[in-house]
Image (spheres, rainbow, N blue to C red):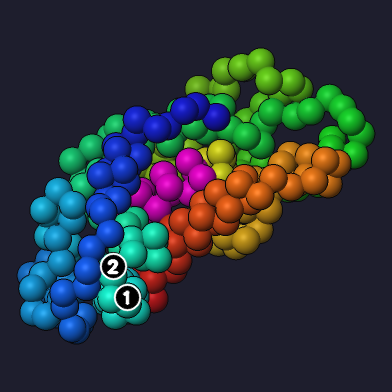
Amino acid sequence: MRNSDDSPVARARRAAKPPLGRRVYKQARVAEGRGGFRVLLDEKPLLTPAKAPVILPARALAQSIAAEWRKQGQRVEPATMPLTRLANSIIDGVAHAREEVVEDIVADAGSDLLCYRAGEPEGLVARQTAAWEPILDWAAEQCGIRLARVTGVGHRAQPEEALNIFRQQIENESDFVLGALAGMTALSGSAILALAVLRGRLSAQEAWAAAHVDEDWQIAQWGEDEVAAKRRQMRWLDMQAAARLVELLRA
């Protein structure tokens, strides 16, 4: 998996982490207007960190984001508002960089986690095969994306035809779906897992488990690091938010 820390979505996500602030609004509600739905904080439209208006394509998504703002206490805690942070990163990071976002996801598919297999130990090999082969088979049979498997960590270029088909699968999706897909790809290390969630082949929980086969094997052997566990939990919340955003767009 490539390092995607400099992708448009990642850059927007970093900008979407404002310092904690005191809650200065009393109410959060949804209003329908030109172009979609807005979240109003005491009748003031919500803006992204880049000061763009937060215009959402589905009422259900707007209602869920408004609920995150209503649940805030005396201080606004961005970490507890994953849908808000994701929407901000999509509006600020995807709308003006669609082609770059698509190519980033396709490039990630070209070095997908599911294609790089351990040669040993036998138990890990078996776990990878059980978790990953059905998804790669699904990608091949249902989507036409036929990727090569590699033993070891040395990079192997994937067939250009497979990557072109993957591109065709995603390039016409909306900005919000692309942003969610990019987020799930970065969090899981697998564009194929992200696509499987998008297409309903996997739940977010199933994709998350598949993405952590190697890590869970290491934990079973050596135990879990507390700091790493907390970081994984925070990333899981973001994974859930990306999958939830897709569900809300379809509600």
Secondary element at tag 1: loop
Task: Say whether residue 247 is left or right of residue 61.
Answer: right
- Please check the rendered image and state whether residue 235 is part of the magenta-colored stretch, yes or no: no
Q: Nearer the viewer, residue 86 or 103?
A: 86
State the residue at coordinates (66%, 15%).
154
Q: State which region is magenta.
A: 176-187
Residue 137 image point, x, y percent = 70, 43
Picture quadrant of residue 192: top right
Secondary element at tag 2: strand
> Is residue 203 something one can see in this rendering?
yes
Quadrant of image for the C terminus? bottom left
Q: Nearer the viewer, residue 200 or 153?
A: 153
Residue 199 image point, x, y percent = 52, 57
> Is residue 196 something one can see in this rendering?
no
- Please check the rendered image and state whether residue 185 is part of the magenta-colored stretch, yes or no: yes
Task: Say whether residue 193 is left or right of residue 81.
Answer: right
State the residue at coordinates (28%, 59%).
20
Disc 1 to disc 2: CB gap under 8 Å:
yes
Spot the residue most to the right. 122
State the residue at coordinates (30%, 32%).
100
Which residue is label 1 attached to? 72
Q: Amino acid type of disc 1?
A: Gln
What is the total number of numbered labels drawn onto the structure image?
2
Residue 135 image point, x, y percent = 67, 47
Q: Which label was assigned to residue 76?
A: 2
Q: Which label was assigned to residue 143?
A: none
Q: Amino acid type of disc 2?
A: Val
